[in-house]
Each structure stands twice: as structure tokens, then as C-alpha cells.
Amino acid sequence: MNRSTKNLYNLFGIELIILACLGLGISYHNRSWLITTFVLATGSIVYLMFILIQNHQDNRVIYRLHGAVKSLNLKTSAQPVLVKPDDNYKDLADEINELAASQNKQIQYSSMANNELLKIINTLPVGVMVINQNSDVIFANPQMGDILDRKISREAHPYTIDIVNYKMLTMIDNVFNSHQSVRSEITAATDGTKTIDTQVVYSRINSSFHVIVIAYDISDVINITQMQVDFLRNASHELKTPVTAISGFAKTLLDGAKDDPEVLTEFLEIINQQSDQLTSLINDILTISHIQKDEIQTSDSVRLKDFVDQELMTQSTQIKQHNLEIQNLIDETFEVTMAFDSLQRIVRNLISNAVKYNRDGGQIIINAYSQGNFWYFSVKDTGIGISQRDLSRIFERFYRSDESRNKQQIPGTGLGLSIVNELVESLSGKITVKSQRGVGSTFTVRLPKEN
């Protein structure tokens, strides 16, 4: 029997006693019984008030217990229900509090796990978008916005607002209809300059389902692959020319041309020139390979003016052939700290480029200076210059403009500027060029003071 029932029985018993006393007082006209009746009535009223207060307190406990149970059902955080030790609902409150504490821990753990998962998804190099079965976007990480070139709202909205590429839209529609995941490489949704590896995944959870779009920009991978193909094709073409010439003249000599002293000398000179060209090409390819391996080199302190003068001496024959005027304006005390081989390749290729593409009687002006945390090295020539069409491609491997290939007949492997560019980038530097057709070109290299 609970406390409320006991209180009702007690109150009922008091009321019966009051009625009995009242009946006796009226029947015998006894004042004492009437006073007793009044006292008992007053006590019953007090007792009734006590019951009402106690019921109110019980109702508050029941209300709190009901709220805790509701929170448990909704799987939300529940506050503990505090009751007195002698309360009738003490055991029930303890059980509910224990369940609530356990569920709160699970909710906290789940929230932490979700936050960690969101952090991971937001730092992934791939775009992720989640679409519910109502075709609304309920989540998208920042990378997906970058890939689609648009800002994606955090509020639920139709996916057609963000995705405008026809092929991507078709993939998502097919997954909604077939409930089968698909994958494909598609062109970017905006300017067509991107290649996106797109996977649309169908995911069922209980009675509902979601469609997850995973997109990865593989444009760089595609470009690198194409560059490798182009490099192999160009290298094969460049290697084929001297090899074919050497083979052809050697066979001609073996067929009898060696018996003519003049022809023999002429053909041997051509074979020697082509051999030098082949050796130069192979050395340049090996240089690029070493740069890509990022091999560690020892840095040395070099007095740059003397270093440049030595490089000019190695190319003095070509300089005299073109009757070029050289101005080395580098201060005699200017020193740089850099790996000797890297500095030599940069200086040698830039000077060689200025010599080859200069006009007879032209000038080459070489200078260097320090500014902030960088030092600058520039080579200016008064040669044929570079057209605006070619400026964006001059650092590509094997690239030479049509003018240099056909009209000027300038020898070279087409790798010189590419080597300089890759070396400078490997040293955290930058190379720039200013040029005008028929006026000349100026190449400027910016490098950190410590390398």
C-alpha cells in the first residue's frame, strides 16, 4: 500500500470518528462531544492540508521522472532527478538516474566521435556531399565547394542548386532511381578545366537512405601524366635526330665514302657534332632527373662576379663568333651561399641562352643584387626576343619557338630554360622574364639568401 492510499484511509477514519462524535454530541446535547468534534475537524483539515502538500511534492517528483524518461526516449541529455532518501520514488529515481547517466555518456561519446569525424571529412583532399532521400543537401565539406567553384549553404537545399554539370546530375539521378552506386571521370562543372573523379554512393540506413557524392580533382594527375607522355615523345624525337645522323653518315662512310679524304673529314666532323649534341641532350635529361630526386648538395660561399667571369670564358668562342659585348655589372664583393653545381647550371644556361638568341654585335648585361631575404641575378640580351604567345611556354621541356627552330637554326636541346626553372623552384625561388620581339629579353632569378 503506497503512501497516498494510507493517507486516504487515515483521512476516511478521522472523518468517521468526527461524524460519530458529532452524532453523540447532538443526541445527548453534550457540549464536550461537540468540542471534541470541533477539535477533530480542525485536525482533519490540518491533516488534509498535509496530504495535499505531500501529493504536490509527489507530483513534482513524478513530473521530473516523466521528463527524465522522455529524455531517455528521445535520446537527449537528461538531468538527474533528486529526491529525499525516504521518498517512495527513491528506488525508481535511482534507476532512471543511472540510465540517464549511462545515456549521457553515450551521447557525449557520440558527439565527440561525430566532431572528430567532421574534422577528418573537412580536412580530406576530396569533396564530400550528403543528399537525403528528399533530394536535399544536408552536408558538404569545404573541398566540395572548391571543386564545384561555389559556396554551398549549410541549410538543407536541393542539390540542383550546387551541381550544374549535366553528367554529374545524371549520375546522381541514376543512383536515386536504381539504388546502385556509380563512378566516373567527368569534366568540371564550371569552366571545363578540371577533371574530377566522381563517385556517387547509395547508402541505406534502416528505412531511409542517403546518396553520398565523393569528388576528387585529378587535374594535376592528368596534367603530370600528359607531361610525362610529352616528355617521352619529345625526348624520343630529339634523340632520334642525332642518332639517325650518326648512323646515316657512318653507313655512308662504310659504303666507300671513307676513301675520299675530303668527304671522310666532312662526315667525321658531322658525326662529332651530332655526338656532342647527343651527349648534351643526355646530360640535360640526367640533370632534370637529379633535380626531381631532390638530391642534397653542399652549399658554398661564392663570389658571384668571378664565378660569372669563369662561365663567360667557357663560352668565349660563341661570344666572339657573334661579336657580342659583355657587361658584367656585379659588384666584386657580392657573395652568395649556394650549391656550386646548381649555381653553375643556372648561370651557364642563362648566359648560353642570351648568346644563342642574340643578334650579331649585340649586348649581354649581367647583374646581381640583394634585397630583403632574397638575392637577384639577371641576364639581359639584345636578341630576337620572345613573342607573347611563346612567353607562357618557354620553360616547358623541349619547347622552342618556331622562329628559333626554323629561321634561326639555333642549336640546343630545348631543355636549358626548363632546367633553370626546375632548379630555381627546387630552391624555393622564382624566375621571371620580360621580352619584346626584336628588342631582347631579360631573365631574372630570385633566390633565398640561404640555400
Image (cartoon, rainbow, N blue to C red):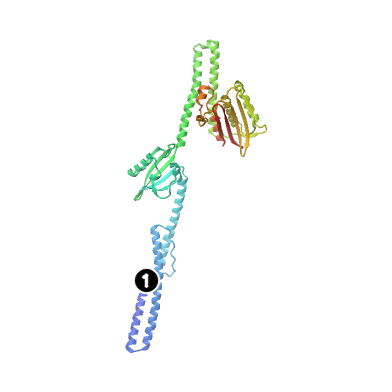
Q: Residue lying furthest right in this view?
A: 333
Lateral position of residue 280 relative to residue 205, left or right = right
**Residue 387 percent location from the top left of the image:** 52, 28
Image quadrant for the N terminus? bottom left
Residue at the far bottom in the pictured view: 29
Q: Tag 1: Cα neighbours inside 10 Å, few (<14), some, or many (≥20)?
A: few
Please determine whether, in this image, residue 237 is positioned above or below residue 220. above
- Seen from the viewer's position, the closer of residues 82 and 52 is 52
Q: Is the C terminus in the top left, top right, bottom left or bottom right quadrant?
A: top right
Residue at image position (39%, 78%) is 45
Amino acid carrying label 1: it is Asn
> How far across and down, in percent of the image, does residue 150 sit?
44, 44
Q: Position of residue 123 (x, y in %)?
A: 47, 45
The residue shown at (39%, 81%) is 42
Task: Say how many tags the image has.
Answer: 1
The answer to which quarter of the image holds residue 195 is top left
* Residue 92 visible in the shown view: no
Q: Can residue 270 be seen in this view?
A: yes
Place of residue 247 in the rendered image (x, y in percent of width and height, measured from the top left): 49, 18
SS for callout 1? loop
Quarter of the figure with residue 348: top right
* 244 displayed left or right of 444: left
Q: Name the residue under label 1.
A: 2
Residue 292 to residue 49: above or below: above
| The one of 33 and 97 positioned closer to us in this rendering | 33
